[in-house]
Image: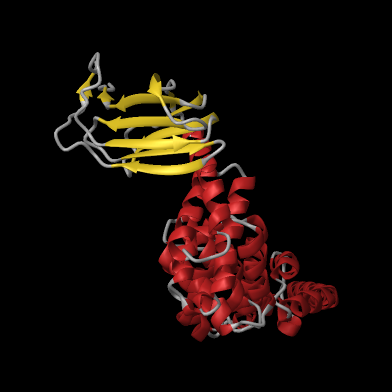
Amino acid sequence: MRSSSEKTSGTGCFVLIGIVIIVILGYSLIRYFIDKPLYNEAHSAFLQGDCVTAEPIYDKIIHKVHFFDYGKFKANSKLENDFCYDFTFAINGGLNPLYLLTIEHPENPLVEFVDEKTAQMLENLAKTKDYAAILSAEECSKESEYVNAGLLVADSTQPLFKLNCGKYLLELDEPEAAFEHLAGILENFPNHPVADQLRKSITWETSFCSLTQQMSESSLFNKDMNNLANIFLDCAENYTNQNEFALAADIYTAFLVTFPEHPDVENVNLLLPDLLIKAARASGSGTIERPNETGWAPEGIARVVIQNDSPHDLRIVFSGPDSRIENLPACETCMDYYAVGPIYCPEQGPIGTYDLTPGEFEVLVETRNEENVTPFTGTWAFPGGKSFYSCFFIVTTTVY
């Protein structure tokens, strides 16, 4: 009896084991048919560099129980998901992580998509203008390394890289490096749409107007002096339209130095005084009253006599019936006063005499090249046949 019972028990164990094996095999077979279309979908996206679509599907496959990995769907999903992780991490980090991916993980099949992703980054960057998100001064200096690594080989990526780096380096106040990138677009990609975009931006916007000095020194621009002059004039006009009066005045001043024989010099000389006065007022200028009447002048003339009793060169600007910019040299024997100025004019410094057409003038008096001295502006009405006198000195105060 005992022998028969043991035999029956052993048979039951084999049957149970067989059932378990059948269940496992059946589950694995079902898992195979479920995973196959999922993996094919994810793998197809992976082959196109679309990890956004592929990764969630890989996760579904990886986190399911697999007794037998028929078709190696789980193993392949893990491998390709790891490739996607590295690729996505690089994309989210910017250009340099993409570059490092190509250098440190050349076996990653997704390396072939780094240029495409770089192009997308640069195109989006041109819209968002959040340059620091993917660029740095160091990255903008590694263009040749990026090209060799395959990041900037598509038709549009290198010009876009240069354009965005140029704009970003201007934000960092590195005009020479910025100009090098922008000039490279016009020199190496003259017929590219990005080059056309750059030319239009120079004419219609003020984004690159801080580079007029570099333009005037570059053969890319100074071969056509008429075109270069128009860039100066367009920049000054665009700055004026944006109420950037100081920047507009700087461009016009540079224009007069660079193009002294240009037909528009006379017009610029008429515009510049008004811009200088507006810029001074925008900066918080003080107010200065009209000089005192001191005597007679020839009929039809308002004579203004100004004496510089300060140790600073002065610029005196008139905008009205006449537009004039005059310079008075410093008084070598004069000094600045602290807190309180003299009751009467010291009458020690150089004198400027200006014969003006009678009428109302906007006037600016400021020191030259000294930003810590407040400029003064005023509205002065001058009748004809009269002369006026005033002196200027500097009173300093201590700010705590």
Above or below for 255 versus 297: below
Kindly tell me whether residue 151 is visible in this rendering. Answer: no
Residue plotted at (75% across, 82% down): 70
Residue 390 horizontal/vertical position (percent)? 34, 24
Residue 243 horizontal/vertical position (percent)? 60, 42
Front-lying residue, 63 or 282: 282
Horizontal side of 338 relative to 268 (left or right) equals: left
Kindly tell me whether residue 354 is visible in this rendering. Answer: yes
Above or below for 382 versus 112: above
Residue plotted at (42% across, 23% down): 288
Front-lying residue, 318 or 178: 318
Residue 232 horizontal/vertical position (percent)? 55, 61
Front-lying residue, 236 or 304: 304
Residue plotted at (55% across, 47% down): 270
Q: What quarter of the picture does the N terminus occupy?
A: bottom right
Front-lying residue, 146 or 34: 146
Above or below for 350 versus 199: above
